Amino acid sequence: MGTAAAGSAFDTDTLRQGIEGTTPTTLLSLYADDAEIRVIDRNSQPSHPKVLHGRDEIGAMLNDVYSRDMTHKLENCVVQGDRAAYSESCQYPDGVRVLAESMITLRDGKISEQIMIQAWDE
């Protein structure tokens, strides 16, 4: 993977380390202070997504996710200018899998907006 286009500090290697790490610290460092995430899934449908504002709310969500006994893997990532998209797969020890697709907007090398669509085994 590697660094995005010249002039951007967004680094997909850091994204991989953050997603595949055991704590949310590295991943959270990639978000702008005023970042926003919209999460769409079975519980938060497209007309009423879960919206998180700022690093504090995003950090709380990531702390919850990374406190769970599960693995995370960055499957694919594409960066073009101030946009990026990536796929993340996760698995719990009992075999339940989660797949998340994200489209992000970058500002000064940080994630400023993210739309995440996720689905999991039931």
Image (tube, rainbow, N blue to C red):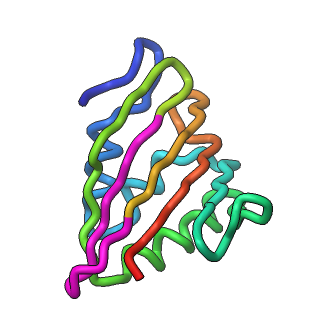
Between 92 and 10, the residue placed more toward the observer is: 92
Q: Position of residue 46 (x, y in %)?
A: 71, 59
Q: Is residue 3 left or right of residue 53?
A: left
- The residue under the point 67% across, 70% down is 44
Between 43 and 64, the residue placed more toward the observer is: 43
Which residue, as the protein is rendered here, is positioned at the far top? 6
For residue 89: magenta? yes
Q: Position of residue 115 (x, y in %)?
A: 60, 49
Between 73 and 56, the residue placed more toward the observer is: 73
Per the rendered image, the range of residues in magenta is 85-98
Q: Is residue 104 left or right of residue 113?
A: left
- The residue under the point 54% across, 41% down is 103
Q: Position of residue 84 (x, y in %)?
A: 48, 32
Q: Is 83 situated above or below 34?
A: above
Q: Is residue 33 left or right of residue 11?
A: right
Q: Position of residue 5 (x, y in %)?
A: 41, 16
